[in-house]
Amino acid sequence: MLDMTGKVAIVTGAGSVGPGWGNGKAAATLLARQGAKVFLVDVVAEAAEETRGIIAAEGGTAAVHKTDMLDSAQVAAMARACVAQFGRIDVLVNNVGGSAPGDAVSMAEEVWDRQIDFNLKTVFLGCKHVIPVMERQGKGAIVNISSVAGLRNDGHGGRTHVGYSASKAAVIQFSRSTAGAFVAKGIRVNTVVPGLMHTPLVESRLAKTVAGGDATALIASRNARCPMGHMGTGWDVANAVLFLASDEAGYITGTEIVVDGGLILASP
Ligand SMILES: NC(=O)c1ccc[n+]([C@@H]2O[C@H](COP(=O)([O-])OP(=O)(O)OC[C@H]3O[C@@H](n4cnc5c(N)ncnc54)[C@H](O)[C@@H]3O)[C@@H](O)[C@H]2O)c1
């Protein structure tokens, strides 16, 4: 089950912004545990290098490629480098993204532009440069990472991040559109929609931008908002990514798996 032996997977944002397990780091490690050769893409080479060290220590195979997923030429070079190193690309996990606070009035125009690029253009560029390789192979699986912010009123959490919500909603529809365009070529495109996850960005970034530096209070309030009483983890996201990337999901395309512990159920 879920055997990835012989497959090559690119994971973007394969490091994490702090100690612990981000979604990308966990997905990359799980894909490697299942036998995939993993191409670890990150704008911070040291972050991806840490993930590579973990995979190597477990006996897996991975390589690091420093890439800014916002730069088309770098993304094209990344796809070429993966083929040069591992011979093919079976799986692409587009994981780069993140939120900035603000509503339609308070958000600076540059922040809006950056949010759309960070969350949506990175996914577009990954697909743009990897799909031609998958087309030549006649097969491929793409998993894009969205957020419940793209499906429900983000104000439930006490703050609005309109650029994040808009771009993560767009990731879902981008994935459906791309799935339709390439379904006859053997390429599947699906989306994982995480809820509130306890990844390093909670302590590293959100505690500063949302909670005035009080990570403990932020963690408690995020746990309290989850119907199961606790946030999910990068591994919960990774398990869904692995399934959608695997041959067991071979008849699944153009859809989403929501990994939110019932969050949308409780506050749509
Ligand atoms: N943690 C949550 O609660 C949560 C919830 C919903 C969705 N998500 C989504 O999960 C994804 C990321 O999760 P994570 O925990 O792995 O993230 P993370 O913030 O730990 O970042 C992962 C890596 O991305 C790299 N990165 C940043 N910008 C990049 C760029 N331009 N090019 C290449 N690499 C870049 C960083 O250097 C970092 O190592 C995002 O799309 C995020 O929106 C997270």
Image (spheres, rainbow, N blue to C red):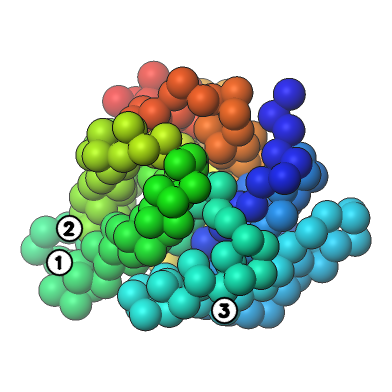
* Residue denoted by label 3: 66
Dot 1: few (<14), some (14–19), or many (≥20) neighbours within 10 Å?
A: few
Q: What is the secondary structure assignment of the residue under circle 3?
A: strand
Residue 40, relative to residue 267: is it above or below? below
Q: Is residue 55 or residue 189 the one in the foreground?
A: 189
**Is residue 70 rendered to the left or right of residue 28?**
left
Q: Residue at x 72, y 45 (%)?
A: 6
Can see residue 182? yes
The amino acid at mark 2 is Asp
Closest to the observer, 52 or 220 = 52
Hey, what amino acid is under mark 3? Answer: Lys
Of the numbered discs in the image, which one, if any, rests on residue 106? 1
Quadrant containing the C terminus is: top left
Please state if 177 lies on the left or on the right of 187 as rendered. Answer: left
Q: Position of residue 11 (x, y in %)?
A: 57, 57
Location of residue 78 in the rendering, given as x and y in whole percent from the top left corner: 50, 72
Residue 223, x across and y down, in percent? 56, 38
Q: Residue visible at 63% across and 61% down?
A: 87
Q: Nearer the viewer, residue 219 or 61?
A: 61
From the Cβ of disc 2, is ligand 1 less than 8 Å away? no
Mark 2 to mark 3 CA distance (whole Å) = 33 Å
Distance from Cα at disc 2 to Cα at disc 1: 5 Å
Crowd class of label 3 (few under 14; some 14 to 19; many from 20; radius 10 Å): many
Disc 1 marks a residue whose amino acid type is Ser
Q: Is residue 233 visible?
A: no
Indicate which disc, 3 or 1, sits on the residue closer to the N terminus.
Answer: 3
**Mark 2, residue position:** 103
Q: Which residue lies at the image location 85% right of the left edge and 62% below the top edge?
A: 56
